[in-house]
Image (cartoon, grey):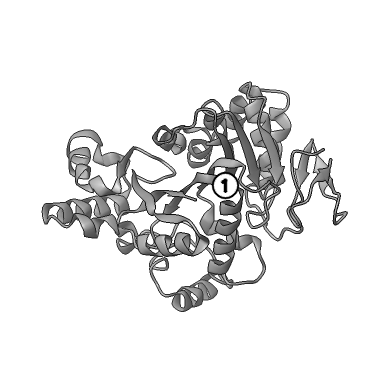
Amino acid sequence: MSKFVCPICHHNLSVDTCNRCSKTFLQQNNIIDFRTKSIIEYSDTPILEKIIKESKQKPWLEVVQKYTADNPWLNHIITSQNRADFLYLLDLEDKICLDIGCGWGQITEPLSSMCQKVYATDANPIKVDFVKTRCIQAKHEKNEYFVSHTTKLPLVDDTIDFVFLVGVLEWIPEGFASGDPRDIQLQALQEIRRVLKKEGQLVIGIENSHGLKYFAGAPDDHAGLPQISYQDRATANSMMQEKHKKDYRTYTYDMNGYQQLLKEAGFYTQKTKYYYPVKSYKDNQAIIEIDNIENLQYLYEKVLPINIFNDYEKTAVKQELELLEKSNSEELQGKVSSYFIISEK
């Protein structure tokens, strides 16, 4: 009997074949690929293939350092522990966790030492293989790894304590050739809610479409265009078509937009908590609960050096301090650059 279920009909599997609908899923390196199709092209695949091949024989960190020596940004993304700093907010002991979009394992590996078990998945099979290798080298033997789309997870209802969706929700529509991006994101959130236990929690890390840095001219973290994230969808789509000849599908929202999306997906939004990861959820320097945003002033003035911020972020920091000086804390809550969101089933 497989530990997974069929993502199509949710029936039991015999190894990699559904006992009800007879669908058979591909398997490579003891990792089952539950995708029915994939249209995603990964720009980092060539370097990743080299890294995973050598990491089978050598320590993964040594191999990553070799192949990212001329790319400090990628090196930081893969090796920095900052991305997982938010985990201290959570009671993870003896919990079953699901890391969706596990990427390079920046969350999966530290998470594995804090909880009972991690299910790690990504739409990129090479990355799942790398994360498995990384965790095995760290002596985390209880985890399970699989390839999937977030809209169809091969897991039983009500079995997961925590689901992590960090830097992922906005990218989910890119895995589909058509369909309204918001509808696809909503479907993914509903699927996540299905596998969560009662009172299980979803943790999202994502940008604020109306963050001050974007109004300062910073390019969108996904589309790469300035002034696109806070436009209406039709205008944003026209901008994307003009520049990249493709539709705008990496939807982000402001705080009210995230609340509405979670509510429609069935989450208990009255208990949803928002945190501001300074300088971003990808590179946490500090984490402030959004209801205590006034503490940001002390952080900027006494703790964090201004030179850790780029020019757009420096402009945003200045504007954040101006809002605090005017006692506009509530307005600032809706203008920070990104959020950690913790929502309960």
Q: What is the x, y in percent for residue 97?
A: 57, 38
Provide the residue designation for mark 1.
Answer: 196
Picture residue at 57% right of the left edge, 29% below the top: 112
Picture residue at 75% right of the left edge, 50% below the top: 34
Q: Nearer the viewer, residue 196 or 175?
A: 196
Quarter the N terminus occupies: top right
Q: Is residue 39 above or below residue 5?
A: below
Q: Nearer the viewer, residue 244 or 117?
A: 117
| Residue 51 seen from this side | no
Q: Quadrant of residue 301?
A: top left
Q: What is the x, y in percent for residue 149?
A: 67, 54
**In this rendering, position of residue 17 left or right of residue 231:** right
* CA neighbours of label 1 inside 10 A, class few (<14), some (14 to 19), many (20+): many
Amino acid of disc 1? Leu
Furthest toward the front, the residue is 198
**In this rendering, position of residue 72 left or right of residue 7:** left
**In this rendering, position of residue 115 left or right of residue 120:** left
Q: Could you say whether the residue bearing mark 1 is in a helix, strand or loop? A: strand
Q: Is residue 229 above or below residue 7?
A: below
Picture residue at 42% right of the left edge, 68% below the top: 228
Q: How many badges with numbers are in the image?
A: 1
Furthest toward the left, the residue is 326
Q: Nearer the viewer, residue 214 or 272?
A: 272
Q: What is the x, y in percent for residue 73?
A: 48, 41
| Residue 199 seen from this side | yes
Picture residue at 68% right of the left edge, 48% below the top: 124
Q: Quadrant of residue 125?
A: top right
Q: Nearer the viewer, residue 121 or 18?
A: 18
Q: Quadrant of residue 120?
A: top right
